[in-house]
Amino acid sequence: MAQTDAPVPGQPIKQTDGVAVMPTGGVLGREQEVATELSVFAQKKPRSLWGDAWRRLRKNKMAVVGAAIVIIFILLAAFAPLLAPYGQSEVVDVRLARFGPSWLWPMGLDENGRDIWSRLLYGAQVSLLVGVVSQVIVLAIGVPIGAIAGYYSGNVDNVLMRIVDVIYAVPQLLLVMIFLAKFGPGLLNIFLAIGLVSWVTVTRLVRGQFLTLRESEYVNAARICGASGSTIMFKHLLPNSMTPIIVSLTFGIPTAIFTEAALSFIGVGIMPPQASLGQMVGDASDPGLVQSYPHILLFPVLAIALIMLGFTFLGDGLRDALDVRGED
């Protein structure tokens, strides 16, 4: 009995009128490959905006360095009462005033004989608290006003934006100083002063985002379904506007920290005995102290610079990571 060659799967068995004929086994093999690829694809977790942003952020070395600096200062500030060997205004020994760095006092003593390391920890606590709380106030005021102006537009937008333009035209530091001159210095008043003055930037940002998104298809679909204006603003538009808001918040924190440091430096911010980095810089700015005992000025200046640098690096990284147009 004559033997016939078995067809090889995936290979044509013969040519018929110039047309290659594929055996049945080859077709089934290809279907199995497609089914396997589909099953593998189905098992993969779907990629999300925040997942992709986190992956891009981890690849950004400067952003990682900035996040590390911010986390270190947050931990130091949070555990300041445990890490500080002395109180924020406790005098170690007035006879040892301006003593240089040593094993016992790593950053030395200031002009009043107080431990600089301890005061720096409590000062970082104040600075970070000012940065975070003031930005919470900024978001609480700026986001709703910007949302209303951007969504309703027309006369509502014109009125609100003219108010914003007037406030924006005046230097923010000057407005903060006027507020503190009226209501007095102190931590609570600094929160309110920075928050009540700095919201205009976030308002303009949110308004621009809402003007861009208000005619989107999903917004029109929500209107057709009978959704109210507040529902559309805060359930549909606001979540899609979070990227620039988060970036603005990250850059707003170091700005608030620098504003508090400037106010304390000129004597209208945090008042003694409470420690503040700006107050420490102001106390150590005497030309005689700078020349003879530079360590009193050096460490608080470095602390302010590192905090602002950390938030700036982190803000740049978040801006790049959350940019959906960016390439991986």
Image: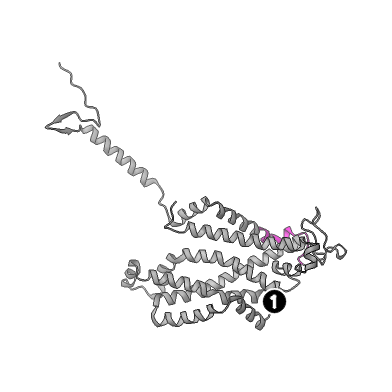
Residue 175 picture location, percent across and down:
60, 79
Which residue is disc 1 drawn over? Answer: 268
Name which residue type carries label 1: Val
Residue at the image position 47 percent from the left and 59 percent from the top: 322
Q: State the SS at label 1.
A: loop
Residue 86 counted in the magenta span: yes
Residue at 43 percent across and 69 percent down: it is 209
Q: Is residue 328 above or below residue 188?
A: above
Residue at (56% x, 67% y) in the render: 252
Q: Nearer the viewer, residue 259 or 28?
A: 259
* Residue 137 left/right relative to 229: right
Q: Quadrant of residue 109?
A: bottom right
Name the residue at 32% across, 67% down.
217
Name of the residue lying farthest toward the right: 95
Q: Which quadrant would residue 289 be assigned to in this image?
A: bottom right
Image location of residue 146, percent across then percent down: 46, 74
Pick out the residue farthest to the top: 1
In this orientation, which residue lies closer to the viewer: 196 or 282? 282
Q: Is residue 245 left or right of residue 28?
A: right
The correct choice, above or below, for 29 with respect to 323 in the image is: above
Quarter the N terminus occupies? top left
Q: Residues within 10 Å of mark 1 (few under 14, many from 20)?
A: some
Residue, far left? 17
Circle count: 1
Snapshot colouring: one colour
Q: Which residues are magenta?
A: 75-88
Q: Position of residue 191 (x, y in %)?
A: 62, 74
Q: Where is residue 139 shown, x and y percent of the image?
A: 52, 71
